[in-house]
Image: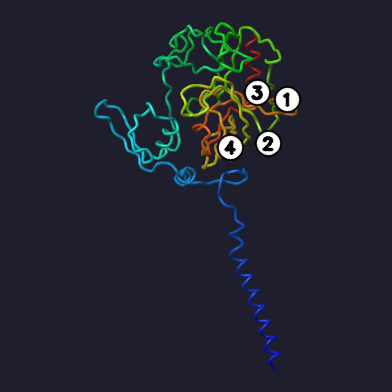
Amino acid sequence: GWHRWAVLGALGLLAGVSIGSWLLVLYLWPAASQPVPGILEDEEMTWNCSEASDEEALHPSLPRTVSFRINPEEFLLEVQVRARPDWLLVCHEGWSAALGVQICRSLGHLRLTHHKAVNLSDIRLNGSREFAQLSPRLEGLLEEVWQPSFRLSRLSSWRVHVGLVSHSTVRPHQGAVVERIIAHPLYSAQNHDYDLALLQLRTPLHFSDTVGAVCLPTEEQAFPRGSQCWVSGWGHTDPSHTHSSDTLQDTVVPLLSTQLCNSSCVYSGALTPRMLCAGYLDGRADACQGDSGGPLVCLDGDTWRLVGVVSWGHGCAEPNHPGVYSKVAEFLDWIQDTAQNSLH
């Protein structure tokens, strides 16, 4: 009799273990196999992030308390954030673009909806130049080069310097004189759509070992997401710096999908068909102020293709805000027609 009970007990124990294991797999395995939300990488996924949770999750270090006041002595605007106990004069010593972005976000302003250009005739040079690839002659005052509404009064003072790596080697009277600047007629200052312009030089460039042409992409050519491309320029190496780099800088950035960059976690639909984005969602490398108009080139076999032109972005190398570029492939017809018309 006891053998029967032993057999029944063993069978019951096995059944209990089996049922328990099945229940564990049923309730625990799906939770463990689900992907953990993190840095956005997969372009096939549809991201639907609420703006509040996006900013709080992606920027947990943002200050939650911001105070403003008018300085009673100088009647100037000052700001104080929890992470910085001292009052800071807005846009003055100790201020940075990154701090401005943080404060705007903490006040609930997550994106720029409208901006107004600053009249450059109101700005003094202060001994520094922001012109990197295209620069006016040094003897000309800023007011003589730029006029309100960005109209060029002395276009002949603009020159293109090629084959150089350092600003210190630029000779003001050398370089190719710019005959005409042709901006795309549909350019929008509101959202930077159609952000492309062509420079017509008075005399052609002479190619050498250090000066050459970059090829345009073909109409059907589409570089896949993840393609490693190069962006270069003399822009700021840190968004808090006030001076451009003296030496040409470059970095590798991967192409990202428009679907990803238009998600609510990144640029919330701000990219148009004339734009592409490239960079890292963890913010490790990016173009910056002063790089606008610079090239984004991708290697196609043994040929470098001009895939993009630096256009805009949210800060510099900020998490979940990669650089946005004008998509050159969308402008091929306009480039060809403009170049042909300039010959007549």
Callout 1: few (<14), some (14-19), or many (20+) C-alpha neighbours within 10 Å? few
Residue at the location (57% across, 9% down)?
Answer: 171
Q: Within 10 Å of the Cα at label 2, are there few (<14), some (14-19), or many (20+) other Cα atoms?
A: few
Element on which disc 1 rests: strand
Tell which tag, 2 or 3, sits nearer the viewer.
2
User: Disc 1 and disc 3: Cα gap in Å?
Assistant: 18 Å
Amino acid at dot 4: Tyr
- Residue 196, image x, y percentages: 57, 22
**Residue under numbered circle 1:** 303
Q: Is residue 167 above or below residue 107?
A: above
Q: Mark 3 packing: few (<14 Cα in 10 Å), some, or many (20+)?
A: some
User: How far is the residue under mark 2 from the one under mark 3?
Assistant: 19 Å
Residue under numbered circle 2: 224
Q: Earlier in the sequence, mark 1 or mark 3?
A: 1
Closest to the camera, between mark 2 and mark 4, is: 4
The Cα atoms of the two marked residues, 2 and 4, are separated by 15 Å
Left/right placement of residue 10 relative to residue 315 reads right
Q: Can you tell which quarter of the image residue 339 is in?
A: top right
| In the rendered image, the vertical position of residue 173 relative to residue 91, given as above or below | above
Q: Which residue is mark 4?
A: 280
User: Residue 332, labelled with which disc?
Assistant: 3
First in sequence: mark 2 or mark 3?
2
Q: Which of marks 2 and 1 precedes in the sequence?
A: 2
Q: Position of residue 317 (x, y in %)?
A: 53, 34
Tell me the element at label 4: loop
Q: Left or right: where does residue 83 sit relative to residue 156?
A: left
How far apart in space, not on screen, are marks 1 and 4 (Cα)? 24 Å
Badge 2 amino acid? Pro
